[in-house]
Image (cartoon, rainbow, N blue to C red):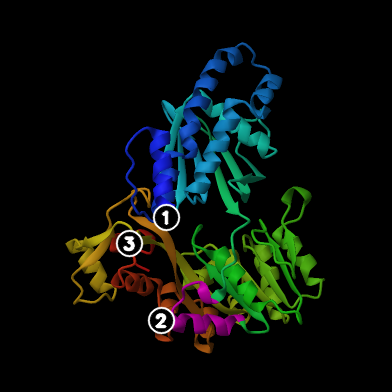
Amino acid sequence: LGENLQGQLIELLKSTVRLVLAAKSDIERVIDQLYTPTADLGDALRMFEARLEARKASQSVESQVQTVVDENAPVVKVVNLILEQAVRDRASDVHIEPVEHHVRIRVRTDGALHQVMTLPAPMGPSLISRIKVMSDMNIVEKRKPQDGQMAVEVAGRELDVRVSTTPTVFGEKCVMRLLDKSRALIELSALGMPADTYARYYDLVKSPYGMVICAGPTGSGKTTTLYATLAAVVDDAINVVTVEDPVEYVFPSISQIQINEAAGLTFANGLRAILRQDPDSILVGEIRDIETARIAVQAALTGHFVMSSLHATDATSALHRFLDMGIESFLIASSLLGVVGQRLIRRVCKHCMEASTLTAEERSFYERAGGSVDKTTFVRGAGCNFCGHTGYFDRIGIYEVLAITDEMKELIVANAPHAELRKLAIDQGMKPLREQAIRLVTDDLTTVSEVLRTVYVL
């Protein structure tokens, strides 16, 4: 077969052919480089420039709409190319940013932004208008921020796209949040928690009532943890109901409610409705306000198991976030079972990993954070085509689990400061995020600079 193929290639190419062995992944990577969606960008830009003068002759709203709804229009093709490139890059967000002389397109992959293309400045308004049309937004209104959403299929993947536009000095900026609805659900045991941390968390989520909170900044994996937790508690013998914005993963056996603020369905009144549906376990996508927080606390106090997420820097900070919202300390102490604080840290790319040493500052931080004083060789990513020359590929979750013990309840009721709460939590067995992150450095999975960027001094 090999000789026959070689002969056919020689005949076809009219040249000498030498067969070599290559890994499938290497071949696919080269194909991706040569046939990226942006390879077709030049044709679309030339077509756009050719039509630009004709567009200037007509400034009517009808003309603008026609320009961005025609599937053969260059701006439509460019938006499609941007989305295709984002999917190829495993991006979570796409930023379309007008700057002084052009439009910059950046995508966020593994938590970091990188530029994928630049476009002519005149194309910016048309791009934003096209995205607004797809998201049922007002294309005429350019002076105010707007929000919208759309469902699209890109490269065989179903995406739920959340769109936000806002005016800037150089024109409207647009950010698209990409939610892959076709992604597989991760099991709780596969999140990557160390055995002792996993055991603490599993004990919390198996309680029949009370509240468990996932805390962290945007993009720290809170939703993934919530869904994994939800999958662990689902049972035919109980009634599980969720209220989410958006519903990112559909469970076939539970009732999931999609928030629709335009129709008056908010987290607060959605949660009120759930409590009349005889629930055993409730997932609230996010606690955003005092009203939702109060209802969630009352649900936990009246025999329901409640899961939710909260924007906070670490597990103990989540307790003060509740206090800042106006929830009484005794209610927090009575309703809360525990908090898991988390981050996602970039993993050093296996394809370009190389030995490295630390700077004096990094070495000092590493040892102060509990790193091994005997370790002298570390790793870093040199940057390659596989990782997009970032030196990192994929991310690893790190977690700290705060269990609300009787001693912790006393401190909460006494409105103890954050440092005192955190010290007690660590004394009672919580492994802090920084310790988990330093372990990844010791195991040659990430770098000290990445730990400083993601966790810093927690």
| Amino acid type, label 3 | Leu
Res. 98 mark: none
| Amino acid type, label 1 | Ser
Residue 197 is inside the magenta segment:
yes
Res. 452 mark: 3
Cα distance between the residues tagged 3 and 2 = 20 Å
**Front position among marks 3 and 2:** 3
Which residues, given as a range, are shown in magenta? 189-205
Q: Quadrant of residue 141?
A: top right
Q: Quadrant of residue 310?
A: bottom right
Number of on-image labels: 3
Residue 11 is inside the magenta segment:
no
What x and y, as percent, mark residue 394?
43, 59
Rendered position, 13 above or below 387: above
| Amino acid type, label 2 | Ile
> Mark 2 highlights which residue?
426
What x and y, as percent, mark residue 1?
44, 52
Rendered position, 38 above or below 399: above
Rendered position, 122 above or below 365: above
**Front position among marks 2 and 1:** 1
Res. 25 mark: 1
Q: Identify the residue at image location x=56%, y=65%.
A: 224
